[in-house]
Image (cartoon, rainbow, N blue to C red):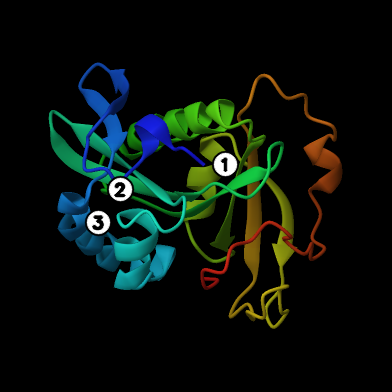
């Protein structure tokens, strides 16, 4: 996959979104210190991804992982780590999203999701999926951004790559590609039953 303007391995920075004092761009390896600090500050919610994933898969170009950085007045305030999936008409995975805790948190998240939408439409992906522990306040954040819960990964259940859920985990989804018609009403899928997440990556569950 030629990631083009989204590519984080080239070292070239591209502005992907602008609204008033907010911008979103692709990341470079120079952003790793900021990403690492924000990841650690929010580890209770986003988990921890080891350095080799960032070095090899994001900034080393070994896989098509991408990171987008949100800035306010050129001050970095958040990021999202995305894995694109393997086929068109599937869902990308938001592996991590972390934003600074302040009054504009929802604005930062909305700006990042706008770029995820651009990515989905560029590469013919249907939208985005993510996991969030049931006990986290972040669930309200996802709902406010327009995500819909389509299942629950129950504590103790093992997914297709062998990871066991350490707690009940909500499975969230949002359709972002206006060129792809949604085939199912997500309200029908919004149950308390465990639904195997066939599109999950090999990154550890949280």
Along the viewing direction, whichever of 45 and 83 lies nearer the viewer: 83
Of pointers 3 and 2, the one earlier in the residue sequence: 2
**Residue visible at 45% across and 28% down?**
114
Mark 1 surroundings: few (<14), some (14-19) or many (≥20) residues within 10 A: some
In the rendered structure, find residue 9 and report the number of the disc placed on it. 2
Along the viewing direction, whichever of 143 and 131 lies nearer the viewer: 131
Q: CA distance from mark 1 to mark 2?
A: 32 Å
Position of residue 112 measured from the top left corner of the image (x, y, whole percent): 39, 35
| Drawn side of residue 142 relative to residue 126, left or right | left
Q: Nearer the viewer, mark 3 or mark 1?
A: 3
Along the viewing direction, whichever of 184 and 200 lies nearer the viewer: 200
Mark 3 surroundings: few (<14), some (14-19) or many (≥20) residues within 10 A: many
Position of residue 201 measured from the top left corner of the image (x, y, whole percent): 59, 63
Of pointers 1 and 2, the one earlier in the residue sequence: 2
Residue 179: name its quadrant.
top right
The residue labelled by disc 3 is 35
In the rendered structure, find residue 143 and report the number of the disc placed on it. 1
6 in relation to 169, above or below: above
Q: CA distance from mark 3 to mark 1?
A: 24 Å
In the rendered structure, find residue 197 and report the number of the disc placed on it. none
Q: CA distance from mark 3 to mark 2?
A: 15 Å
Mark 2 surroundings: few (<14), some (14-19) or many (≥20) residues within 10 A: many
Along the viewing direction, whichever of 85 and 142 lies nearer the viewer: 85
Instruction: Judge whether residue 183 can be spotted in this image.
Output: yes
Position of residue 23 measured from the top left corner of the image (x, y, whole percent): 26, 27
Residue 39: name its quadrant.
bottom left
**Residue visible at 72% across and 61% down?**
197
Position of residue 125 measured from the top left corner of the image (x, y, whole percent): 63, 35
């Amino acid at each position: 996959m030629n990631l083009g303007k989204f590519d984080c391995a080239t070292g070239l920075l591209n502005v992907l979104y602008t609204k008033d004092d907010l911008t979103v761009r692709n990341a470079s390896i120079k952003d790793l210190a900021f990403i690492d600090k924000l990841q650690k500050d929010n580890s209770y919610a986003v988990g921890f991804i080891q350095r080799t994933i960032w070095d090899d898969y994001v900034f080393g170009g070994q896989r098509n992982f991408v990171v987008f950085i949100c800035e306010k007045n050129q001050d970095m305030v958040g990021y999202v780590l995305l894995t694109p999936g393997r086929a068109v008409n599937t869902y990308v995975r938001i592996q991590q999203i972390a934003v600074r805790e302040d009054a504009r948190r929802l604005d930062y998240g909305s700006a990042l999701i706008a770029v995820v939408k651009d990515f989905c439409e560029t590469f013919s992906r249907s939208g985005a999926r993510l996991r969030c522990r049931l006990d986290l306040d972040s669930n309200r954040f996802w709902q406010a951004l327009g995500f819909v819960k389509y299942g629950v990964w129950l504590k103790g259940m093992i997914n297709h790559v062998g990871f066991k859920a350490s707690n009940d985990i909500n499975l969230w989804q949002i359709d972002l590609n206006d060129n792809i018609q949604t085939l199912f009403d997500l309200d029908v899928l919004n149950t308390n039953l465990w639904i195997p997440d066939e599109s999950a990556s090999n990154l550890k569950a949280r």
